[in-house]
Image: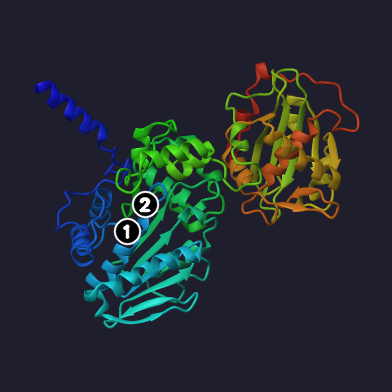
Amino acid sequence: MPRASSASSARSTAARPRLGREEPRLFTPPLRPLTPETSLGFAAIEFAEGTLGWTLFPWQKWLLIHMLELLADGQLRFRTVVILVARQNGKSTLSIVLSLFFMYVLARDLVIGTAQDLDVAEEIWQAAVDVIDETPELLELKEKTSQTNGKKFVELATGEKYKVKAANRRAGRGLSGDLVLLDELREHQTWDAWGAITKTTIARAFALIVALSNAGDATSVVLRHLRRMAHLTLGDPDGIIAAEDPESQLADIPAEIEDAEGQEDDSLGLFEWSAPPGAGIWDRDAWAQANPSLGHTITERTLASAAKTDPEWVFRTECLCQWTDGSLEGPFPPGAYEATLDNGSRIVKGSPIYAWVDVAWNRQRASIAFAGRREDGLLHAEVVASRSGTDWVVDWLLPRVAEHRIVAIGLQASGAPVSSLLESMQVAGLPLFEAGGREMSASTALIYDLVRDKMIRRTAQPLLDLAAATAIMRRLSDGAWVWDRKKSLTEISGLVAWSGAAWLAQPKSMPEEPEPQVHAWDDEPSPSTDMVNDDEEQWW
């Protein structure tokens, strides 16, 4: 009998589904024990289950309790909450519960829902309206609904309203919001929408901004910054602060936000369900950490199918809620740029060094790249300097031409911002290669081929990584392609310089191939570490 009982127990255990983690892997800890007196989350759960008749998942209850923590004076502790969780785990349900709870229970005047794709925000809004229509207790208070595209709202007889706004620089202007729901924040590639819609809460003492998303990529400027600030407060648990230079990785941050970096802020809350760094895609415990609805609406079988069929970087972003340094929609084939990373890569002693200079379209930054051969014959290229302005370029290059025996320095000689440096570089006697349109298109095509075929290596450089993830190509009249400095989502002078240096280092790129020069790497640090940037904008 005991043996049969044990076998039955084993079968029962084997049949029990793996459950997602109720508690996020990373989160902002509460200031004190959370009870119905110290968190509105308990009231929100009671509203969802009692009034709406919904059964929330354990992780959703945990989150409501923690994100709606109260201060001693009765105000919400958090002004901004960032929720990171893998796809299809029930973020929309939370949005609906929060919007109706703020309107019906807290009697807050205005809920604003937005997403980069307006259809997404409107779907969540429509789901909330459907809940109102299907719940007599809520329907009794509904005054009117507008279904006009771009101007959808539902209003209660007591004045509370839930509106949908597009995520753009005009979003919410002229409004005062009490709850702002930003879905898919990973898609915000500029600060325009964030700056417009979140400022609707400035005049509201009891207001909450809720940003929901899965993991982002190099283009997710807003989400990356918020997550970084929260991780900084938590002591950098994943080492993202130590691994990157925020000055370069987070380009185009508004000055007032950048100035606040490093200052303590206990009004920002992070709740991140994600797989830990280094987890394999078949680590089922990692699945549970990123998918708290596992065993409820998500099965191991569906995740296993995704792991088998998705490219690894897609599965990690969408199903493990892990960040990528590239972009799923960048100019290079997905995963190709990431595959060129080798932090131990260096130019071998004796290999000639080729340089390229480029300047941003608005002339606010200049970048210099080096390229040469590794011991295994593969091409190594990296951006060795990137600083604001242009007046530093010649003085920076002059001593290094002799020190590193640079064979040639390329730049676009006309029709580009960098061409204004040509005369001063000529006067200084630098070994120049003056490129025209043919060479610029050739360098763009070559770097694409080198990355696609994984025939180039680089070290991790956040500014270059960001440019490689967000750059846009422009087709010329002859069908060739070049990097478009102005239309790219972020500043790309580093990528243009990286492409040019790689092209210059290829055989027969120069009109006459120079004799190889000896480069004394043994006696000097590599370009990754020896280029000291006096204005504290060094980023490699």
Left or right, 383 with respect to 407, comes to left
Q: State the count of labels.
A: 2
Disc assigned to residue 94: 1
Q: Amino acid at mark 1?
A: Leu
Which one is closest to the eye, mark 1 or mark 2? 1
- Establish if 398 lies above or below 44: above
- Establish if 373 lies above or below 411: above
Position of the C terminus, as image quadrant, is top right
**Which of 416/298 is in front?**
298
- Residue pictured at 60% horizontal, 32% vertical: 339
Label 2 sits on a secondary structure element that is strand
Q: Amino acid at mark 2?
A: Ile
**Which of 164/191 is in front?**
164
- Establish if 10 lies above or below 259: above
| Residue 111 x %, y % | 35, 70
Is mark 1 in CB contact (under 8 Å) with mark 2? yes
Near mark 1 (Cα within 10 A), the count class, few <14, some 14-19 or many ≥20, is some
Near mark 2 (Cα within 10 A), the count class, few <14, some 14-19 or many ≥20, is many
Kindly report the distance in space between the C-alpha atoms of the residues bearing marks 1 and 2.
Answer: 10 Å
Q: Residue furthest right?
A: 512
Left or right, 145 with respect to 406, comes to left
Position of the N terminus, as image quadrant, is top left
Label 1 sits on a secondary structure element that is helix
Disc assigned to residue 83: 2
